[in-house]
Each structure stands twice: as C-alpha cells, then as structure tokens.
Amino acid sequence: MAQVKVFGLRASLDTHRYKLSEAIHQAIVEALDYPTEKRFQRFIALEEADFIYPSDRSPSYTIIEISMFAGRSTAAKKALIGALYRNVNEACGIGPQDLEITLFETPRENWGIRGQPGDELTLSYTVHV
C-alpha cells in the first residue's frame, strides 16, 4: 500500500497536477514493483499565506509524502526517491532544490483497508522488494 500526499502552492499544483501525478505513480510502480492500477494520491493546494518555505525555494516548491507498509529494502526506498527526483524534474521541470520527499513506513496492522486490518489483507503484490 502506498498513499501519496502532495503539498504545494495552488498555482503550481494546478499547472503540474496531471504530469506530477503520472511522474509520482511511475516512480512508485518502477521502484516498488507496485501494481499500475493502484493509485492513491491527494493533492493539497495551499494559498501563499498557508505555505511558508525558505527563500531559497521557488514558487514550484513541492513536498511529497508517501505512507506505505513497512518492509521495503533500503535499496528500494532509495530507488523510489531517485525515481521521484528524476521523473518530477523531467515531467514538470521541478528540480531537486524545489522537491522534498518523505517516506513514512508503518506496520501493516496499523492500516485499515476494505473493512479489515492491513495485515489480514491478501495483496496482489509483494511488499518485500
């Protein structure tokens, strides 16, 4: 399971939403061997007064937070981060200075999905990559 939250200024997210969504999804599919039909993304568009960031970032500054089941290898997580930087830059022109990524891993039993605890779900993909 991977739930994605994307935070940024409304004007930037409105400009890049579709390409950003595709870039993020492709990175997750590629790095985590994730099923292509599993896309869970939320875009949180903020007004300038609600998004305070350092002066060395541009109005394209974007934060990607991904919550996922624990169990991926360090190599898989580094591959995901690398793919996100590459894909987002290629698709949207948002460079590394303007992109921050945080991965949150939680045990499957801490998730509730389709009426049951996550550790009781039968998955169509492997978490341990």
Image: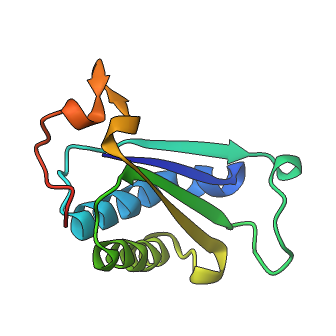
Q: Quadrant of residue 31?
A: bottom left
Note whether residue 66 is visible. yes
- Residue 95 in the figure: left or right of residue 57: left
Q: Using the image as rendered, state which of residue 88 and residue 115 is in the foreground.
A: 115
Residue at 42% over, 71% down: 84
Residue at 54% over, 59% down: 64
Image quarter where the C terminus lies is: bottom left
- Residue 128 in the figure: left or right of residue 18: left
Residue at 55% over, 44% down: 43
Residue at 46% over, 77% down: 85
Q: Quadrant of residue 59?
A: bottom right
In the image, residue 17 lies at what x, y percent?
51, 52
Q: Is residue 52 above or below residue 122?
A: below
Note whether residue 16 is visible. no
In the image, residue 48 lies at what x, y percent?
84, 52
Q: Using the image as rendered, state which of residue 106 and residue 15 is in the foreground.
A: 106
How many numbered marks does the figure carry?
A: 0
Q: Quadrant of residue 77?
A: bottom left
In the image, residue 36 lies at what x, y percent?
19, 51
The way the protein has been coloured in the rendering is rainbow
Q: Is residue 55 above or below residue 12?
A: below
Q: Using the image as rendered, state which of residue 30 and residue 93 is in the foreground.
A: 30
Q: Using the image as rendered, state which of residue 17 and residue 124 is in the foreground.
A: 124
